[in-house]
Image (cartoon, rainbow, N blue to C red):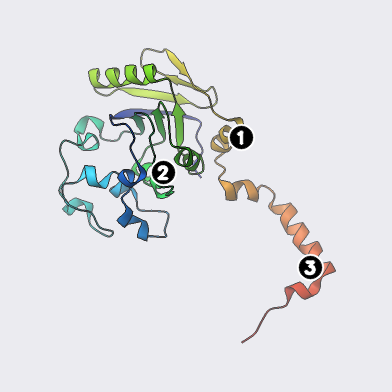
Amino acid sequence: MQAFTVHQGLVAPMDRANVDTDAIIPKQFLKSIARTGFGPNLFDEWRYLDRGEPGQDPAARKPNPDFVLNQPRYAGASVLLARENFGCGSSREHAPWALQQYGFRAILAPSFADIFFNNCFKNGLLPIVLPESQVARLFDEVAAFPGYTLTVDLPRQVIVKPDGSELPFEVQPFRKYCLVNGFDDIGLTLRHADKIRAYEAERLAKMPWLDQRLVG
């Protein structure tokens, strides 16, 4: 998993409350069991005028010019500004996959759905809860200033605005530790690889029949 320490990025505003996971990545794209390739279909039903299906060439489709991510001023955005209850709906892990693979590293919102919130941390995406008044102010500033960027400093747990002012945020220490070090669940386990191998060798020495394999 990609580590997250300090990230500076262009901000894109998603000015809708209760954005659910089916809007983030529609159900037809869940057929894939791979964990890659979902970025082009992020917000597919809002982002394109035609219906999307797995395997389509995005360059051959009809983009919706009114959708925020299709506007030139937000090209390359890596910080998503959202409203309350972002990521509600079904528990699909494909939603943070799509956001992360599109290029987003952090999402700022007044609140998130619990399962989506947890899935973000497991996939290198940082969801940050801010007071609604601060989020509203950020929406105003993003609209007023093209090229608006924020710096998210996870070790210090602050968001640095263009004027140098800082917005503090809370993050659970264990989640912070995993993100800063780039540890997903597998990475956490592999920290103990030597101990695991030693245990398996000791167990086989005591119970060699466990190494029997079926032939045929």
| 174 versus 143 height, above or below | below
Query: Circle 2: is it few (<14), some (14-19), or many (20+) Cα within 10 Å?
Result: many
- Spatial CA distance of label 2 from label 1 is 19 Å
- State the image coordinates of residue 204 (x, y, percent, origin top left): 79, 68
Determine whether the residue tagged by mark 1 lies in a helix, strand or loop: helix
In the image, what residue type sits under mark 3? Leu
For residue 204, the mark is: 3
- Spatial CA distance of label 1 from label 3 is 34 Å
- State the image coordinates of residue 199 (x, y, percent, origin top left): 77, 58
Query: Circle 3: is it few (<14), some (14-19), or many (20+) Cα within 10 Å?
Result: few
Determine whether the residue tagged by mark 2 lies in a helix, strand or loop: helix
Disc 2 target residue = 96
Disc 1 target residue = 174
- Spatial CA distance of label 3 from label 2 is 40 Å
Q: Nearer the viewer, residue 75 or 61?
A: 61
Determine whether the residue tagged by mark 3 lies in a helix, strand or loop: helix
Q: Residue visible at 27% across and 60% down?
A: 55
Question: Left of 134 or right of it: where is 192?
Answer: right
Question: Left of 45 or right of it: where is 94?
Answer: right
Q: Residue visible at 42% across and 54% down?
A: 35
| 32 versus 93 height, above or below | below
Q: Earlier in the sequence, mark 2 or mark 1?
A: 2
Q: Nearer the viewer, mark 3 or mark 2?
A: 2
Q: Residue visible at 41% across and 24% down?
A: 151
Q: Earlier in the sequence, mark 1 or mark 3?
A: 1
Question: Left of 216 or right of it: where is 93?
Answer: left
Q: Residue visible at 32% across and 54% down?
A: 27
